Image: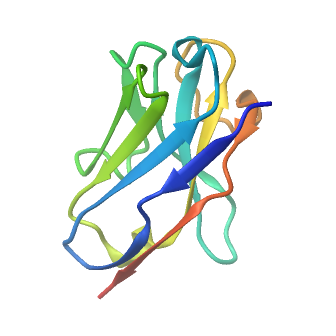
Amino acid sequence: QVQLVESGGGLVQAGGSLRLSCAASIRTFSTYAMGWFRQAPGKEREFVAAISRSGGSTYYADSVKGRFTSSRDNAKSTVYLQMKNLKPEDTAVYYCAARDLGGLREVRSDYDYWGQGTQVTVSS
């Protein structure tokens, strides 16, 4: 049974920072590529970032490139999303996802497991 649990969300002012964590109950965590998505009210869930199994490669949506950084600690079975210079348009529920294959993917259906999400609210 794979479980993903996000944490670290909250309320922050524009220009501030947050770091999200996603703890995975996956015995072979290092064999899973991971992704981050977000969903704002009334909008589709959209891709934010992806990180390879080793953590050596990352890929970001244009809207967050240069502001967000994803990393992972395979020894702790945890993936992170460091968010800086947050904007009100970053307000959303953020989800982590696990893909039981390698590669960096931005399509939701390419991921096999999802967390429950954590709310990020950025005030102006």
Residue 43 in percent (x, y) is at 67, 69
Asked whether, in this view, residue 36 is left or right of residue 69, the answer is right
Query: Is 107 in front, or is 100?
Result: 100
Residue at the spot x=46%, y=19% of the render?
Answer: 52
Image side of residue 67 versus residue 89, left or right: left
Give above or below for 39 relative to 115.
below
Q: Residue at x 63, y 18 (%)?
A: 27
Where is residue 55, by image quadrant?
top left
The residue located at (39%, 41%) in the rendering is 80
User: x and y percent of residue 7 in the render?
Assistant: 48, 57
Q: Is residue 107 left or right of residue 21?
A: right
| Nearest to the observer: residue 86 or residue 2 | 2
Please determine whether, in this image, residue 112 is positioned above or below residue 118: above
Q: How many marks?
A: 0
The C terminus: image quadrant: bottom left
Report the front residue among 61 and 24. 24
- Could you tell me residue 94's position as x and y percent? 54, 58
